Image (cartoon, rainbow, N blue to C red):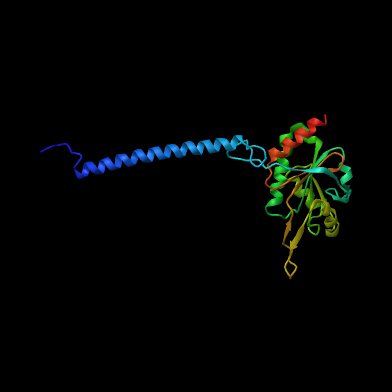
Amino acid sequence: MNKFLTSNHPAARIGLFVAVFVVIFAATYAIYSFALNRATNDLTQQPANGAAAIVDREESFTPGTPVDPPLTLSDFTLTGNDSQPISLSDLRGKYVLMTFGYTHCPDYCPTTMAEFAQVKRLLGDQGANVDFALITVDGERDTPIRMGEYLAAFDANFIGMTGEEETVREIGQEYGLGFEAQRTSNGQVEYAVDHTVQRYLIDPNGNLIMTYSFSAQPETIAADLQAMLAANT
């Protein structure tokens, strides 16, 4: 009895079919992998729609939006962490990275403050030339003491500003600010406040020069500030 299978034997035909299938699959996978790698490389090298090129395959940085021409902001006065009046004009001479929010915010605001702290760390010694500020949209609960304690958890030098709701709404018009407290009819103490989550960069002369979305990375903001600070030296 012949120990070897001939090409006409059913088992031989099955083996041949499997071998052919493996070869076809391997070739197809190789072509797919080459195309995928080529496309990925193109993404890391070529800008899309005129935007900056992606500098890392795993993390893209969202750039800020220049305000052109810069907007000369109206001065305003609120109450600071130390319970003393503080005006926007008091911050002249430094860049100001500012946002609107509130201390009971469960998500956006603590994330923003943590990223502000990261921007300051990335700036190193240059961080002394930048003020970081939070204007509350919840003046009813955010007293100066509350603001000070909240911000100290991120950086002791962060500036908090609080005031009457109508005053903050008037100030916010130039920034495109919108906010609304989600109170129930029974006037509950704990409530959320929907609010704009943009970040605003103000130059040493009090002009709004950049806005950043919530998705903008601290590295991007720090890089912008480093370039501006270097240009002013």
Q: Residue furthest left?
A: 1
Instruction: Quadrant for residue 5, please give it.
Output: top left
Q: Is residue 205 left or right of residue 21?
A: right
Q: Quadrant of the N terminus?
A: top left
Question: Where 13 falls versus 228 (above or below)?
Answer: below
Observer able to see residue 9? yes
x and y percentages locating residue 30 in the rendered image? 43, 37
x and y percentages locating residue 91 in the rendered image? 86, 42
Q: Residue furthest top?
A: 233
Question: Where 128 falls versus 214 (above or below)?
Answer: above
Q: Residue at x 23, y 43 (%)?
A: 13
Q: Is residue 203 left or right of residue 19?
A: right
Q: Residue at x 74, y 56 (%)?
A: 195
x and y percentages locating residue 143 in the rendered image? 81, 55
Q: Residue at x 85, y 48 (%)?
A: 82
Residue toward you, 123 or 83:
123
Question: Where 28 falls versus 183 (above or below)?
Answer: above
Observer able to see residue 208? no
Instruction: Quadrant for residue 233, please give it.
Output: top right
Residue toward you, 208 or 143:
208
Badge count? 0
Q: Residue at x 42, y 39 (%)?
A: 29
x and y percentages locating residue 211 in the rendered image? 76, 45
Q: Is residue 183 left or right of residue 58?
A: right
